[in-house]
Image: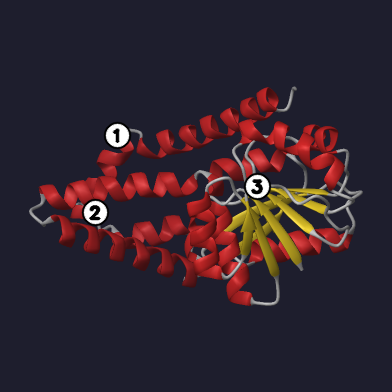
Amino acid sequence: MQITFIGGGNMAGAIIGGLAAQGGHRIHVVEHQQDKLDQLAASFGCSGGQALPERFSAADAVVLAVKPQQLRELCLALAPRLNGALVVSIAAGIRLDALRRWLGSERIVRVMPNTPALVGKGVSGLYADAAVPAADREAAEAIMRATGLTVWLRDEAGIDDITCVSGSGPAYVFYFIESMIEAAAQAGFDEAQARELVLATFDGAVELARQSPLPVATLRQNVMSKGGTTERAIARFEADGVKAAIVAGAMDCRERSIEMGQQLSQE
């Protein structure tokens, strides 16, 4: 597959890295910062340039990996060059109706990836209208599968749903990790030990949850004994509304995703 990435930031680099590891793809990057182009070329052997190609082929895939605020201008510049190429947009918020309007094309797949794609553990939610052919869906999924798990969403609103769970979810996990590292430091561990202990604890807990047939709530209860140390900690979390705050924060995230989509797609 000939794949052109427009934008060479972290997420684009993660996808390119996964594709390069698979092999068999011809990858080109359009990026205005020469140092990023040089780094991607050195790391993954892809070609690059600062200008858009004059014309794409209908067999090409074009991945839009720029900031949402830059997408309208980019799409308008791309429209006369696309020549029917498949477009995969990983830009947050921009709705399909706006992308179709700006690009003058129906061959578009929206994707919400997340940052663990950088280590091959990403989650990507994909959506395309029913009119998009199965071959295009398979091509888009193949691109994103290079970075981890892929999930097809039933409707475009699902992009907002997965944003609040997987798209932004790593930040919630990092927030909890930060808190646990701070607790470990207060308990007397140095910074390196605190980080190592907390990361290993998260890694082990996630792997146990993955392998166990038990509900996560049951796994939590299995760590607790009546009147014990874990029960005391969970009681504080419950009293302070930690679980409720996490759920409410995720719903706030979803609401903001909807708002951004409405704002950025109006032009």
- Depth check, mark 1 against mark 3: the one in front is 3
Q: Is residue 71 above or below residue 17?
A: above
Tell which of 36 and 25 is nearer to you. Answer: 36
Q: In this view, does 23 lie above or below 104?
A: below
The residue drawn where x is 51% and y is 64% is 121
Kind of residue indicated by mark 3: Ile
Say which residue label 1 marks: 239
Say which residue label 3 marks: 90
Picture quarter containing residue 95? top right
- Depth check, mark 2 against mark 3: the one in front is 3
* Mark positioned earlier in the residue sequence (2 or 3): 3
Tell which of 7 and 144 is nearer to you. Answer: 7
Residue 99, horizontal then vertical, whole percent: 78, 37
The label number, if any, that marks residue 230 in the structure image: 2
Which residue occupies the extreme bottom position in the image? Answer: 23
Picture quarter containing residue 58? bottom right
Tell which of 192 and 83 is nearer to you. Answer: 83
The residue drawn where x is 74% and y is 53% is 62
